[in-house]
Amino acid sequence: MTRRTRILGVGSFVPDRIVTNDDMTQWMDTSDEWIRSRSGIEERHWVEPDNTTTSDLGLEAANKAMAASGITAADLDMILFATLSPDHEFPGTACFLQEKLGCPGIPAIEVRQQCSGFVYGMAQADMFIRGGMAETVLLVGAEIHSKGMDISDAGRDVSVLFGDGAGAVVLQATDVDDPDTQPHIYSSHLHADGTYAKELWVEGPSMTYAPNRYSGDWLERGAHWPKMNGKTVFKHAVTRMPEVATEALDANGFTVDDVDLWIFHQANMRINYFAAKQLGIDDDEKVFNTIQRFGNTTAATIPIGLDEALKAGKLEPGMLVCIAAFGAGFTWASSLVRW
Ligand code: ACO
């Protein structure tokens, strides 16, 4: 028997408020046709313009994941929280979530790998569990983008793409005799290339400014809004996601045809279409996309995808699931799971 990690339960949460592509036209010069044809997005969920925080969304998802797993916060040994939209600059959002969950004392760790954050978190949880430091880990991916984007014409290339939301899984140690039938994570594969760090980033405020991080003209330049070189991101995403998915398959002796369900990061429907084509996936039904309804929820897209696939009856015990993500950094990652 080998000590491995399994996903015990999944949960997700999006705020009630739906913002359609047509709704976006009240703030910027755009159209449903432009957004839909370039990205596949039809609508996204945004929080009300109130004091809701990323950890609030994370809490909702975490509670659902723990209920689905039949555990409570008292059973957790560790919290991992993946986000690029933290409640505050410090301490980490994992600590704010921990306070809301009421489980002081256990480690609470922030994962700052943007769209790949959830898969990085899966790898970390798997290693903590396999190494014996934890039995049961809560991993949350959550974002509030709506309060951090320029929704004027100047920011329209970015702001039409992103939605708010959260997803969570509970991961637990398991003994595996037969990896082909018993639920577990086979392996995760992580990469980054900081050469491209400024192709998708928020520049300010910044410790590079002197005499302090609020100096200079960054506010006038709008350097506090996310900036993206869309074409470069697109080009790298369609290469790196298939590459890292193939790495996971090769590492475990599987082929593309062995995979029952593909859960790709949801940045752009066209990226996922090209990735699927590159991999030679012949059955569209095996690629589960949610971007149409939620937009890009960054660290939350993977667990939202898993939860929505479960609700849609597309994810069943025994399935081989390949997860792949690409995002700012650039970072990219994959995970192969027996469900
Ligand atoms: N509505 C209307 N017009 C727009 C909008 C908008 N929302 N945004 C930009 N435009 C305009 C531009 O101003 C430009 O106009 P111009 O030609 O007059 O200068 C034109 O549309 C650009 O159009 P295209 O060249 O057709 O744009 P492209 O095909 O590159 O699509 C897009 C843009 C959708 C952003 C694409 O590059 C993309 O999806 N890139 C990847 C984005 C991504 O994946 N981001 C996140 C991943 S990582 C993460 O999640 C953190």
Image (tube, helix red, strand yellow):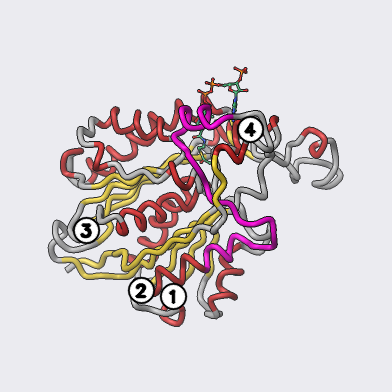
Q: CA distance from mark 1 to mark 3?
A: 27 Å
Three-letter code for the amino acid on which mark 2 is drawn: Glu
Front residue of this view, candidates 113 and 194: 113
| Residue on which the image places disc 2 | 135
Are the two marked residues, 2 and 4, in contact with CB atoms closer than 8 angstroms?
A: no
Q: Position of residue 127 (x, y in %)?
A: 37, 61
Tell me if the residue at label 4 has its CB under 8 Å from ligand 1: yes
In this rendering, position of residue 276 left or right of residue 326: left
Tell me if the residue at label 3 has its CB under 8 Å from ligand 1: no
Q: Position of residue 81 (x, y in %)?
A: 51, 61
Quick one: quadrant of the C terminus? bottom left
Front residue of this view, candidates 100 and 335: 100
In this rendering, position of residue 216 left or right of residue 328: right
Three-letter code for the amino acid on which mark 1 is drawn: Asp
Are the two marked residues, 2 and 3, in contact with CB atoms closer than 8 angstroms?
A: no
In this rendering, position of residue 196 left or right of residue 301: right
Label 3 Cα neighbours within 10 Å, binned few <14 / some 14-19 / many ≥20: some
Front residue of this view, candidates 246 and 164: 164
Are the two marked residues, 1 and 2, in contact with CB atoms closer than 8 angstroms?
A: yes
Residue drawn at point x = 40 percent, y = 56 percent: 303
Quick one: quadrant of the N terminus? bottom left
Q: Choose mark 2 or mark 3, whichever is in front.
A: 3
Q: Mark 4 vs mark 3: which is more N-terminal?
A: 4
Are the two marked residues, 4 and 3, in contact with CB atoms closer than 8 angstroms?
A: no
